[in-house]
Amino acid sequence: MVSSVRSDFIAETTALLARTPEVLRALLIGLPEGWTDTPDTADGWRPRDVVGHLITGEVTDWIARTRRILEQGPSVPFDRFDREAMLHRDAGVPLDDLVERFAALRAENLATLGDLVTDADLDRRGLHPSLGEVTLRELLATWAVHDLDHIGQIHAGLAGSHDAAVGPWKTYLGILLRRDDPSAVPG
Amino acid sequence: MVSSVRSDFIAETTALLARTPEVLRALLIGLPEGWTDTPDTADGWRPRDVVGHLITGEVTDWIARTRRILEQGPSVPFDRFDREAMLHRDAGVPLDDLVERFAALRAENLATLGDLVTDADLDRRGLHPSLGEVTLRELLATWAVHDLDHIGQIHAGLAGSHDAAVGPWKTYLGILLRRDDPSAVPG
């Protein structure tokens, strides 16, 4: 039961976070493998790896860090995010199953968020192990923008599968040009 | 009535093209304006401008160029694509209406494509006014990758609306860093 009045910030952030499973379903479920088996860059991630990375975030990161802020503040730094946990964990799991696993975890986490956080908590602070002090508001905004960043990465992998197929049009397609230019990929 | 046997290429390309309206609906319909009112770069396009650009493609480009290839081959170059037609045409139209307008046009165009094109046509040629000779296969692959490129642009605008909100995490979010670095945006 959510008894708190939510701020616009929490409602707006949740509005984006709640859409990601539907976006991934619309884009990926049943899409032919000719589209889905290419990484976003030569040493990057295939769409299935990106969905696995999003699953890791749901399991180990966003809600865990929210609880750390609420329970311990900046006295204990966040645990580090294992960015490559999915590469062994999800080997052999079909992409469609990964999308549904992510969707279930996201729904559960948004319900938890609704129970845990009110407007009054947004300025509470935690300690990021590399970035230093951050607020709960920044954590929640990052959760949503992180979704957008990685859905974009999925698009780059899908596009990359047809890099040769577009012929001379490649020169107009930034999503393909950026795959070949590592300077366009921030570290 | 589609009487031809479709190649894998046409079926796979259509599978991607048919998803874009659902992806845009899942992402944009009803999304709070706090997310949707920011361009992808300082002089870029808001999500509504991108959807308008996709509408222009449906109205003036992809099927028109398909017909030009089938009817005239490379003897008459394609008409140029007005990349900014939406800026005046769609002023004042709500974003949700633009998404539905795009969805209707895309459905109509995929039905037309199914009527017009068979596997045997894919190597037929047309003349791009800047790029020179191209094949129908390249045109159709480009239609799909162009979708992915511009959905990515929508993501960049959505993310950009929360550029300040993520605080120090920005350093990890390529989708935000690329907005500030024009060298990452191919011309």
Image (spheres, coloured by chain):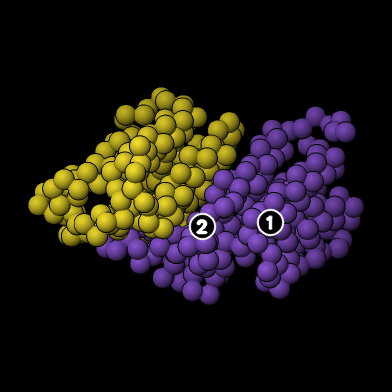
Chain colours: A yellow, B purple
Residue A183 visible somewhere in the drawing: no
Which residue is painted at 35% across and 67% down in the image?
B164
Q: Is residue A118 visible?
A: yes
- Label 1 is found on which chain of the structure? B
Q: For mark 1, what is the residue?
A: B97
Residue A162, position in %: x, y?
59, 46
Q: Secondary structure at mark 1?
A: helix
- State how far apart marks 1 and 2 are (Cα): 15 Å
Q: Is residue A41 above or below residue A110?
A: below
Please give the residue where the numbered disc 2 appears in the rendered image: B32
Farthest residue in the top direction?
A92
Which amino acid does the dot numbered 2 rest on? Answer: Pro
The residue at 61%/48% (across/down) is B25
* Location of residue B161 in the rendering, given as x and y in whole percent from the top left corner: 45, 64
Mark 2: which secondary structure?
Answer: loop
In the shown orientation, is residue B90 left or right of residue A135? right
For the residue pair B146 and A140, the one nearer the viewer reads as A140
Residue B66 on image: x %, y %: 80, 51
The image quarter containing residue B7 is top right
Left or right: residue B34 compared with residue B170: right
Crowd band around label 1 with a 10 angstrom C-alpha radius: few (<14), some (14–19), many (20+): few
Q: Chain of mark 2?
A: B
What residue is rendered at 50% in x and 67% in y? B38
